[in-house]
Image: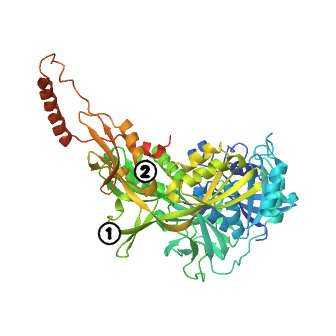
Amino acid sequence: MKNIRNFCIIAHIDHGKSTLADRLLQTTGTISDRDLQEQTLDDMDLERERGITIKSHAIQMAYNHNGEDYVLNLIDTPGHVDFSYEVSRSIAACEGALLIVDATQGIQAQTISNLYLALEHDLEIIPILNKMDLASAMPEEVTDQIVDLIGCDEGDVIAASGKTGLGVDNILDAIINRIPAPKGDSSAPLQALIFDSVFNQFRGIVAYFRIMNGTIKKGDLVKFVNTKKEYDADEIGVLRMDYEPRKEISAGNVGYIISGIKKAKEVKVGDTITHVSRPCDKAITGFENVKPMVFAGIYPVDTDEYEELREAMDKLQLNDASLTYEPESSAALGFGFRCGFLGMLHMEIIQERLEREFDMTVITTVPNVSYKAFTKKGEELEVNNPSDLPEVTTLDYVQEPYITSQIITKSDFVGAVMGLCIEKRGILKNQVYLTTDRVELQFDMPLAEIVFDFYDRLKTISKGYASFDYHPIGYKTSNLAKLDILLNGDQVDALSSLIHRDNSFHFGKKICEKLKELIPRQQFEIAIQAAIGAKIIARETVKALRKDVTAKCYGGDITRKRKLLEKQKKGKKRMRQVGNVEVPQQAFLAVLKLND
């Protein structure tokens, strides 16, 4: 066990951790130069195209240091704030972490939050200054930031470049010398932490685990503590570029288990594996069910494709356990699913994967968050869909989820960033100057305000310099109202939203104006209204297409013209009663981009 090292790589999005992981794999000879490609561990097309890591990836490397053979288990984690639960489980499986900071950008919000996660688990932190080959690198300035943040010596910071391979040998030496070997008792009852799972269409779900205590052998009968399910360990092994089966794996090591599991719900990241015959006393702490933060309806464009969409969602959930969904129906869009996502990036990725991997074209409704509604009888209801909100007569008050957010930006943009946060109902909690021109702002704000367009606008006003990180802090009572959109008096349920009363008039007017542009003119007049309960707060009218019925009247009495116009008016009125309004697909998407 003394020659095993378990470590993960943590960084802000786009600071070069996957590229550095490639160099580590190359230097240790885990992968041949022929098989190497950019971002080797990122195996999804989407990850490569966007240059981001969406899923954690684990791999084992062998390395000879001073004549001794070492086993290095590396876990490459996502950098985006949406996937922080996955990062926290990866951290729990390690004894050390490589904290990578981009030498051209300095410390960002996600760097700090991932660092705090690592410190909570008492991990040995190895700070690395990446992208040192670039002309715009600021090594002295960024090293000072790291020293201030971690409290290490300047000599502890390793200068490296994922692109050129500079400093990789120093990193490997630091991993062996600084990161402690895992502790654990191979003869104790089995206790292993599941930190990730993937779906293999031929073999079912493959769970990745780290053994804290005990030993697991091929063919053992094991039990997953939280789901209380029992399985045979058909195959166990270690993770190289491919799966490498082994007869047994003991404490301190990282491996995988295949036991023919077909349902995603049976394997939960953070769960504990133990033996049925000799179970461990207690499960490993820190297990949580993943909580979706953003909800949206996903509907097939063609209603006949509902069953195919259900199959596609099932398969996606096997690969991505943090996606939750349940069937729902809408008068405007037919049958579809109410889906829960970790955040807006997660929602975008699911939508794109549906289109690419399953060839499904879907409509996504306005995203919203999960509210708590309290009735006058004292009942508490969870509201994931605005149409589930109880009637005004029975409703007492509504609570909405709040987050605390960390924004790190250049001091030139502080005024603009503060203005945006206050517009989004944020309350300034703290303001710290990290260096002379970098400021950390802390705001408490409603989650509902950031799921819309907050991230895009933050990047725009800060010219791409601001970084953003958040975590939930619970629910607070707010003055919320349900805003309905009516077309000729009929409610379009897919456009309903829960919104703060102070913003409702402004928001309702904007939606009405946007719909007026997008709904094609008909033979009859269309009234577009925004309403709260029975009160109409905004209205726009799409004028009817009219034929000039008075063209044949030239001269003569005015009553002849009036008679023809009255007759046309009656016809239009009758047509309006039978005519129904088709809402174009762009209208549902346009609501997401109201500020453009």
Q: Amino acid at mark 2?
A: Val
Q: Nearer the viewer, residue 136 or 19?
A: 136
Foreground mark, 2 or 1, reads: 1
Q: Is residue 236 above or below residue 330?
A: below
**Which residue is the extreme one toward the top?**
554
Total marks in image: 2
Q: Residues within 10 Å of mark 1 (few under 14, many from 20)?
A: few
Can you see residue 11? Answer: no
Q: Quadrant of residue 301?
A: top left
The structure residue drawn at horizontal position 57% and vertical position 44%, both measured from the top left corner, is: 45
**For residue 557, side relative to residue 126 (left or right):** left
Give how far across and how far down residue 530 sits, in percent.
35, 49
The structure residue drawn at horizontal position 23% and vertical position 33%, both measured from the top left corner, is: 523
Can you see residue 344? Answer: yes
Give how far across and how far down residue 3 sits, in percent.
79, 67
Q: Earlier in the sequence, mark 2 or mark 1?
A: 2
Q: CA distance from mark 2 to mark 1?
A: 26 Å
**C-beta proximity under 8 Å, tags 2 and 1:** no
Q: Amino acid at mark 1?
A: Thr
Q: Residues within 10 Å of mark 2 (few under 14, many from 20)?
A: many
Q: Nearer the viewer, residue 488 or 2?
A: 488
Give how far across and how far down residue 507 sits, in percent.
43, 48
Task: Give the SS element for disc 2.
Answer: loop
Task: Give the SS element for disc 1.
Answer: loop
Q: Is residue 569 above or below residue 333?
A: above
Position of the N terminus, as image quadrant, is: bottom right
Q: Which label was assigned to residue 394?
A: 1
Residue holding disc 2:
366
